[in-house]
Image: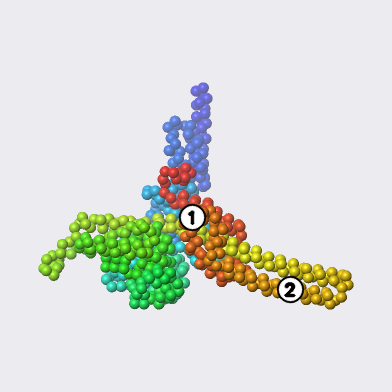
């Protein structure tokens, strides 16, 4: 027995030696799995970890040994040319396609969030799915805006609020260097995009909007006045290396709109409100804010102690432009360190809550972040009117303000991580909007088409009947006067019937396009949601009802495109399968997560 064991050992060593020699001499290399399996019987101390190490490292070294540097440079340049630059450490993330397959266990970073590779994959899939539904949206004149499937090149934080509320100062604080001009009076009338870059560069509005890569070409729809009141500031050495910040003009009530929010709130909107907004600034300010807020990853609404919610334009923007964005909206009461007495703070805070309650249709108000920015200490002291030195705020009183500022800053720094969730949410909402638009429109169109074909069958039956009677008259040699009379009566009867049916069909179309009938179509096509009092579907219907009615009226039900069942199936498949799959990829690991079991 010992003799046979020694012979087997010598044979195995010879095979392994030949395999190792062939691996070093071959240009293609040899799989380390084969070598490891051959060498495994030689030693009882051969562990699983050594097998794993040889399996991962040897093929990569064998395949990329002499060209490793060039491949690294190529991969690094390809990653930095990507629009979504989620990582700033190319040396630690330089991988090839084979490495990505071998590194699948590392799906999350240290914070439990998806890795940059998975984030890139999610963004690409969302973009593809969004692009796939745009042809149907164009065919049906759907509710999705043009180029809505194209996002900005980087995530961004959008700041809006009263003038002199500290928006520009907060941007300078976040960036770590002075970029925006700050002051008590309104200092800027432009929407300013501050982006990270290799050097300081400024561009005007036409250059910003005309850039095909940065993602703001959609602003062109608001007219040249708005385009000329936008600008881009690229700055180096700022702290936000992977997201942008957008400053907006400070809101203030002009004499033209002295009614403040009353025009839009009490009057229900309308053309007068829109024309007043255009006359105030030369463009639709509410629409522009809505455009930025829909695409932003974090929205900050600033108030200051001097005007705690008393600016009507600010409340109007909160009602009309920021509605439905509570998941990414932060309300900030800035400059809270200006209060010298507790009852002054109580009055300002209460006034803000009172004004917000007028435009927020909920019993519970959202959190209001009361904060202040750091003020540089001064050596000299100033005296008050009576010659006494005013007391500085106690450090313990400022601790809560500093903590609130830290909370706001933390939310701002989460903008890149929020982009993933916001993109998936935007895709989910877009598919729901288009699906409901298509389903209700097809229901209305099919009812109209059914009535139209009933009229045509009736007219065709009359024609066939008249032709049959004329044919019988000719067959039985009836006098031609009778045959001619039958033909004339048929033509006149069918013509009169066609005129009557056409007029009735117009009445039917007007009735089908009324608000009541459209609501009835919604209830008929979504019976389960109506019975369950689903508020989400009700809100989606409120968003598409008026645009749907307008598009159907302009196009006409006779010319409106039919919706195929396959197209509706594709939309439902995105909602049922694709979006949940993306959610699982984007969600952090937790107990009960299905991806932990995959």
Q: Residue 529: image x %, image y %?
A: 51, 55
Crowding at dot 2, Cα within 10 Å, few <14 / some 14-19 / many 20+, comes out as some
Question: Number of numbered discs present?
Answer: 2
Q: Residue at x 36, y 67 (%)?
A: 315
Q: Quadrant of residue 156?
A: bottom left
Q: Residue at x 64, y 73 (%)?
A: 503
Q: Residue 441: image x %, image y %?
A: 57, 63
Using the image as rendered, state which of residue 79 and residue 122 is in the foreground: 122
Residue 17 makes an appearance in the image? no
Q: Secondary structure at mark 2?
A: helix
Residue 572 makes an appearance in the image? yes
Mark 1 vs mark 2: give the one in front.
Answer: 2
Q: Quadrant of residue 303?
A: bottom left
Q: Residue at x 39, y 72 (%)?
A: 263
**In the drawing, does residue 529 fall left or right of residue 485?**
left
Q: Secondary structure at mark 1?
A: loop
Q: Residue at x 50, y 35 (%)?
A: 38
Q: Quadrant of residue 312?
A: bottom left
Of the image marks 1 and 2, the number of the one nearer the N terminus: 2
Using the image as rendered, state which of residue 566 and residue 63 is in the foreground: 566
The disc placed on residue 341 is none
- Residue located beneath label 1 in the image: 533
- Residue located beneath label 2 in the image: 493
Q: Residue 290: image x %, image y %?
A: 42, 66
**In the drawing, does residue 347 fall left or right of residue 98?**
left
Using the image as rendered, state which of residue 381 and residue 234 is in the foreground: 381
């Amino acid at each position: 027995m010992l003799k046979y064991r020694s012979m087997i050992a010598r044979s195995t060593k010879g095979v392994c030696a030949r395999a190792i020699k062939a691996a070093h001499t071959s240009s293609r290399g040899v799989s380390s799995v084969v070598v490891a399996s051959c060498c495994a019987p030689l030693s009882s101390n051969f562990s699983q970890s050594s097998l794993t190490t040889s399996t991962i490292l040897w093929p990569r070294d064998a395949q990329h040994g002499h060209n490793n540097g060039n491949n690294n440079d190529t991969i690094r340049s390809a990653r930095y040319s990507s629009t979504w630059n989620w990582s700033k450490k190319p040396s630690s993330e330089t991988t090839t396609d084979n490495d990505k397959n071998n590194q699948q266990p590392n799906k999350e970073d240290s914070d439990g969030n998806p890795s940059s590779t998975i984030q890139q994959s999610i963004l690409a899939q969302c973009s593809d799915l969004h692009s796939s539904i745009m042809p149907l949206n164009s065919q049906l004149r759907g509710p999705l805006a043009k180029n809505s499937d194209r996002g900005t090149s980087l995530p961004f934080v959008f700041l809006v609020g009263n003038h002199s509320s500290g928006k520009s100062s907060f941007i300078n604080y976040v960036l770590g260097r002075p970029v925006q001009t700050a002051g008590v009076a309104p200092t800027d009338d432009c929407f300013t995009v501050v982006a990270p870059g290799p050097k300081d560069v400024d561009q005007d509005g036409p250059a910003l909007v005309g850039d095909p890569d940065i993602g703001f070409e959609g602003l062109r729809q608001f007219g040249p006045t708005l385009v000329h009141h936008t600008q881009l500031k690229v700055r180096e050495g700022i702290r936000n290396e992977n997201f942008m910040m957008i400053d907006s003009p400070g809101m203030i009530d002009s004499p033209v709109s002295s009614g403040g929010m009353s025009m839009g709130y009490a009057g229900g909107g309308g053309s007068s409100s829109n024309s007043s907004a255009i006359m105030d600034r030369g463009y639709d300010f509410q629409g522009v804010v809505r455009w930025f807020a829909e695409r932003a990853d974090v929205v900050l609404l600033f108030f200051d102690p001097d005007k705690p919610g008393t600016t009507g334009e600010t409340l109007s923007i909160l009602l009309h432009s920021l509605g439905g964005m509570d998941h990414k909206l932060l309300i900030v009461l800035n400059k809270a360190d200006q209060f010298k007495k507790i009852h002054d703070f109580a009055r300002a805070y209460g006034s803000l809550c009172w004004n917000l309650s007028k435009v927020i249709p909920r019993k519970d108000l959202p959190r209001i972040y009361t904060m202040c920015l750091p003020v540089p200490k001064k050596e000299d002291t100033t005296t008050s009117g009576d010659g006494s030195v005013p007391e500085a705020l106690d450090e313990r009183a400022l601790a809560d303000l500093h903590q609130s500022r830290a909370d706001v800053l933390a939310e701002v720094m989460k903008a890149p991580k929020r982009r993933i969730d916001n993109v998936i949410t935007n895709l989910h909402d877009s598919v729901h909007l288009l699906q409901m638009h298509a389903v209700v429109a097809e229901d209305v169109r099919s009812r109209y088409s059914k009535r139209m074909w009933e009229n045509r069958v009736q007219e065709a039956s009359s024609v066939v009947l008249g032709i049959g009677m004329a044919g019988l008259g000719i067959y039985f040699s009836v006098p031609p006067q009778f045959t001619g009379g039958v033909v004339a009566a048929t033509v006149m009867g069918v013509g009169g019937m066609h005129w009557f049916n056409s007029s009735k069909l117009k009445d039917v179309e007007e009735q089908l396009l009324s608000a009541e009938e459209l609501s009835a179509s919604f209830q008929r096509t979504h019976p389960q949601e109506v019975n369950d009092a689903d508020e989400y579907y009700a809100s989606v219907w409120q968003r598409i009802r008026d645009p749907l009615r307008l598009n159907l009226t302009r196009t006409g039900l006779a010319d409106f495109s039919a919706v195929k069942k396959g197209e509706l199936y594709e939309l439902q498949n995105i909602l049922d399968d694709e979006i949940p799959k993306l959610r699982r990829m984007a969600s952090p690991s937790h107990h009960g997560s299905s991806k932990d079991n995959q």
